[in-house]
Image: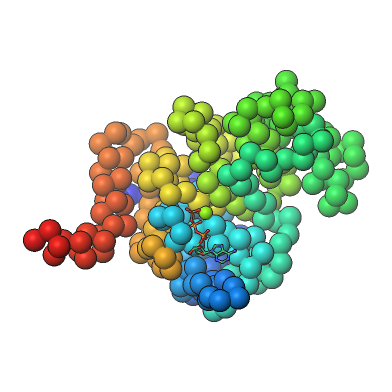
Amino acid sequence: MAGESAGAGPGSPPPGGTDGNVPLLDVRGVTLQYKTKDHLVTATYRVDFQVLRSDRFVVLGPSGCGKSTLLKAVGGYMTPVEGEMRLKGERIGRPGPDRMMVFQEFDQLLPWKTVAQNVAFALTSSGKLSSREATEKALHYIAKVNLTAFANSYPHTLSGGMKQRVAIARGMAMEPDILLMDEPFAALDALTRRKMQEELLQLWDDTRFTVLFVTHSIPEAILVGSRILLLTPHPGQVKAEIDSVPRGQANAQQRAELEAYIHQTLFADEKATAEPTHA
Ligand SMILES: Nc1ncnc2c1ncn2[C@@H]1O[C@H](COP(=O)(O)OP(=O)(O)OP(=O)(O)O)[C@@H](O)[C@H]1O
Ligand SMILES: [Mg+2]
């Protein structure tokens, strides 16, 4: 399947990493575990992948395969027991403003702050911007997600989709090296979800940000992603890494073929073990 070359458009950043051949995010042999009082849970096992600048990199896999865990580790909230993760060549050791996270939940905003204050808050607390500069930047990104009219509204007056737009604006306003999105549209109704996927792609056309996007929806992965990493069920291991169908050129049949291919790749083992019982 021919891949879409990220950054191929006019005026876009050069393809590839930040520094010659160094990937923006380099994940090598990463095993992640949870140690509870009674159990040791291996969430991912020796996972490898590389994200280049301007990639829309999707991690796709069934529930419980370790997608959120991987994202948490990239965010710096968990340390691998094996392998390593590097951002621009630097080992990831702790959370930082170079990796902003957008979650699935609608309650990730501060309820006592307006939309503009929510977006500006992270900017002022990093200490780099004055409150006026932070508000200006916040309003710029609020406009990008089409919420200018709601800049002074409080989160409880917004729909789920609007709250997710605020969370995206907040993440983008920090201008991180990579935006980490954990099923950001999963709790939305189907129509809003589709609209948000399109809006995210328009935003990408506009700014060419790098995004690491987690989903368990195959159609969403194909639509949103330029590259797709397929993980096996628990513990998550890399099954394959594929290019999505090129945006704009993909027809329904191409999408359906890729969807069937991914489905078959993800669930081939399940079928193989299930078949004898039906024989
Ligand atoms: N805090 C935790 N303590 C112990 N085990 C955990 C913890 N969080 C996740 N796990 C386990 O790690 C594994 C991977 O979980 P994770 O949440 O990363 O999966 P996921 O792919 O994001 O699933 P979903 O699609 O349902 O969100 C699961 O077996 C889960 O039970
Ligand atoms: Mg998850």
Q: Residue at x 37, y 63 (%)?
A: 232
The percent coordinates of residue 103 (x first, y second) are 61, 47
Q: Residue at x 36, y 55 (%)?
A: 242
Residue placed furthest toward the top: 149
Q: Left or right? Give the position of 29 relative to 168.
A: left
Give the quarter of the figure containing the C terminus: bottom left
Q: Is residue 159 visible?
A: yes
Q: Left or right? Give the position of 157 relative to 15.
A: right
Q: Left or right? Give the position of 37 relative to 135.
A: left
The percent coordinates of residue 69 (x first, y second) are 55, 62
Write down the quadrant of residue 18 in the picture. bottom right
Q: Is residue 4 visible?
A: no
Q: Residue at x 27, y 40 (%)?
A: 256
Residue placed furthest toward the bottom: 82
Residue 42 versus residue 279: which sits nearer the camera? 279
Vertical comparison of 259 with 272: above or below: above
Residue 57 versus residue 19: which sits nearer the camera? 57
The percent coordinates of residue 198 (x first, y second) are 50, 32
Q: Residue at x 32, y 57 (%)?
A: 266
Residue 8 versus residue 227: which sits nearer the camera? 227
Residue placed furthest toward the left: 279
Vertical comparison of 48 with 108: above or below: below
